[in-house]
Image (cartoon, rainbow, N blue to C red):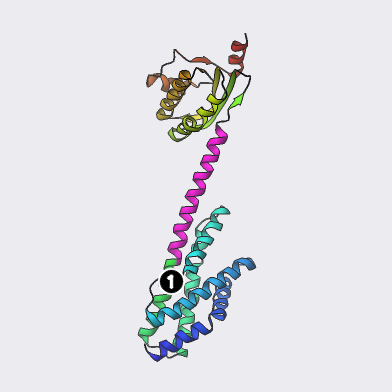
Amino acid sequence: MKPTISNLAAYLKTNENELAKTIVDSVLERMELTISQQEKDRAVTMYEALVNFLSVSLESDEDSMPPELIEWCKLNAYELVSANGEISEIIVRYPPTREVFTDLISGWSKQFELSTDDFTLVLKKVNRLLDVSLEETVIAFEDYNKTMKEEFKEEIDVLSFPVVPLTKEMAVIPLVGNMDEHRTNHLIETVLPKVNDLKINYLIADFSGVNDIDELAVRNLDSAGSMLRLLGIKVISTGISPELAKTAVAIGVETDSISFYGSVRQALEMLNS
């Protein structure tokens, strides 16, 4: 290793804390951005690790990434998703960060009399670190965002199919929103067992709150009705829209074994008469 690069590596390792604070302050100043002290402290800690890693890589050609950098990226992504933010809020920080590092490297080049090749080497290593940081942040953001959406969807599914007991022999399921294959599968897998546990004789499936429904969902609901009848539970459907009726007839849903009423009230009047 050339003495100039060796001297730079030693300088980075000795001054990592001071350099990290300079980087964070300079980026925030360029962006005219204010962040919490906790977020700033985390950023300083991360850049300390990055500067230290840079010093080591200059001496040993280390190509792996510091774990502190990866964890920092994941934490930033998680907090952004939790706050319902956009990934662009983080991406916009990278150009000014590269500018700050370029200015620093130019200063180091003069201070330690680096050759053009040495300057290019240091710049490539820093850009590599920033590229990995950006990639890891975007990947983590997409993963957390997908996970949160799936969890939210599951919560919506549970809330969308409340089984409401009306009497010892009767319960109602108000169906709401858009019905698709996923949601009707959820109904079959998790809701129908709860219905069976109620030991009821009648189940009213109210469709008045359904906005849209596809053919696969209709087929799944038909299967669900067949399962309930096998369990000895009579299915009563209310609030069927003309569109749903057309779809059911078109795919050959057996309607002879199902009672249909315009509303839950009409169904209750019939059952109580």
Location of the C terminus (image quadrant): top right
The residue identified by callout 1 is 129
Q: Residue furthest left?
A: 117
Residue closest to the eye, 160 or 67: 67
Instruction: Say which amino acid is labelled 1.
Output: Leu
Residue 208 visible to an observer of this rendering? no
Element at label 1: helix
Residue at (48% x, 78% y) in the render: 52
Is residue 162 shown above or below 27? above
From the viewer's perspective, is 77 left or right of 223?
Answer: right
**Res. 50 visible in picture:** yes
Foreground residue among 61 and 95: 61
Q: Is residue 159 left or right of residue 181?
A: right
Position of 214 with respect to 205 (left or right) is: left
The residue lying toward the viewer, choosing from 8 and 163, is 163
Q: In this view, does 25 lie above or below 138?
A: below
Q: Residue 95 magenta-drawn?
A: no
Residue 40 on image: x %, y %: 60, 69
Q: Where is residue 144 in the image (x, y as percent from the top left)?
A: 49, 53
The magenta segment? 133-160
- The N terminus sits in image quarter: bottom left
Q: In this view, does 37 lie above or below 21?
A: above
Task: Looking at this view, name the residue that lies furthest to the top.
Answer: 273
The residue nearer to you, when weighing 57 against 128, is 57
Q: Magenta span: helix, strand or loop, mainly?
A: helix
Indicate whether residue 145 is drawn in magenta: yes
Query: How far from the left and from the top, in percent, is residue 178?
Result: 49, 33
Number of dots carrying numbers: 1
Residue neighbourhood size for the residue with mark 1, other residues' Cα within 10 Å, grouped as few (<14), some (14–19), many (≥20): many
Image spot of residue 239 (x, y percent):
54, 21
Q: Is residue 8 above or below residue 220?
A: below
Residue under the point 59% across and 11% down: 270
